[in-house]
Each structure stands twice: as C-alpha cells, then as structure tokens.
Image (spheres, coloured by chain):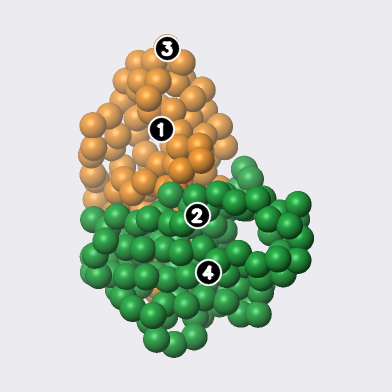
Amino acid sequence: EDQVTQSPEALRLQEGESSSLNCSYTVSGLRGLFWYRQDPGKGPEFLFTLYSAGEEKEKERLKATLTKKESFLHITAPKPEDSATYLCAVFDNTGKLIFGQGTTLQVKP
Amino acid sequence: SAVISQKPSRDICQRGTSLTIQCQVDSQVTMMFWYRQQPGQSLTLIATANQGSEATYESGFVIDKFPISRPNLTFSTLTVSNMSPEDSSIYLCSAMDSADTQYFGPGTRLTVL
C-alpha cells in the first residue's frame, strides 16, 4: 500500500535558524513527488515537483531534494512569513496524489 | 499554472439538507478532483470528476452521498447530500494540468448543525 510519512509533525524555529522537513514514502511506481504550502483557511499552494532521485529544486529560501525513499524540504534562514503547514504528496501510477499528514512550521521573530 | 475558484467559500447548513459546491478553472485541464480535509488533518481524495461521465469514487465515498458533475473541461460541482455534523469539513477542488501538476482551489468550509 502506498504511504507517505512526514516528520516532524510540528517544528518551531527562530528567525534565521535553518532546518529540514522530511517526507518518507513507499509507492508502487512514483510518477512524481509534490510539495505544497498551506496557510490556515486556504487551499494548498503548489511549490515543487520532483521526478527522479537526485533532483533538486529551489524557490527563494526553500530547496527540495529527492532520493529513492524520501524527500527533504530545506528551509534556509527562515522568516516569520514562512510559517505554514508544508504538505508532501506522491503521485503514483494510478494517477492519484497521496498526501502525508504535513509538518506545521512556526518561525518566531 | 491553473487558477481555481470555488463557491461558496463557506456555509452553515442544517442537518438533512444538501449543499452544492461549484469549482471553476481558468484554463483547460486534464483532470479534476474533489478532496475533503477535516480539521487538523491532511487531504483525503473523494473522487475524480470525469468529463461527461460518472465520477470515480474512492473507497468510503459513494455517489448517493457525494454526487459529482463535470459538464465540461473547466467546471465541476460536488453535492454533499443529506448532511450530518460528521460532514463538517473543508472541501477542496483540484485540477491537473498537462504537466501532471495539481493545483487547488481555496476550499469551501462547511459546518453542519
């Protein structure tokens, strides 16, 4: 059964304190791995798609990487406006997105 | 990227009634989906909305409870029928573009009394 596990569930950082979020997955036939950001009361906002092991993508203070079993979302020198829930999802060979439970990030000034 | 709008953004409904949620995409997309997100939880796929034919439902979701229409490539509706308090949730529409990227609408927050 396809499964996506994110850790930690919650993360508190001081402004400027870099860290990483983890997404571990087991899937039969990975077509892609997605990262989304979700603010309270809003729909998920697309950040990145990764397709193959070794791939990396960057956007401002965020960098996503992918291996055969997990993905990391690195946050460099975060700011309070980076506070949100970050969702990881795998796109399997049935054409469905399977979401993890998310990591809620709080960045304090 | 696709921009998705949903109506209504929120509603409070009485037990036993039905609510229809509309989803409009600003560009042609390959697939459309409906998700549910319960408070503090992640997203659960309800069904894939198929253009001009019956939706494909996930385990635990049935057409009588969640009828879905998709009359064209950019529009879909989800009805939550015979509502109970357990149906209180956020309902999200999403659409996939030709690059297999899924974009999400802002969600409809439903409260059933």
Q: Judge if badges 2 and 1 mark residues of a common chain.
A: no
Q: Nearer the viewer, mark 4 or mark 1?
A: 4
Vertical relation: B102 (above or below) A88: below
Q: Nearer the viewer, residue A45 or B21?
A: B21
Q: Judge if badges 3 and 2 mark residues of a common chain.
A: no
Badge 4 local density, few (<14 within 10 Å), some, or many (20+)? many
Callout 2 amino acid:
Pro
Q: Alpha-carbon distance for marks 1 and 3?
A: 18 Å
Q: Which mark is residue A20?
A: 1
Q: Nearer the viewer, mark 4 or mark 3?
A: 4
Q: Judge if badges 4 and 1 mark residues of a common chain.
A: no
Q: Quadrant of the N terminus of chain B?
A: bottom left
Callout 3 amino acid:
Pro
Q: Are marks 2 and 1 in contact (CB under 8 Å)?
A: no
Q: Are marks 1 and 3 in contact (CB under 8 Å)?
A: no
Badge 2 local density, few (<14 within 10 Å), some, or many (20+)? some
Q: Quadrant of residue A62?
A: top left
Left or right placement of residue B76 versus residue A52 in this view? right
Q: Are marks 4 and 1 in contact (CB under 8 Å)?
A: no
Q: Are marks 3 and 2 in contact (CB under 8 Å)?
A: no
Q: Alpha-carbon distance for marks 2 and 4?
A: 11 Å
**Chain A colour in the picture:** orange
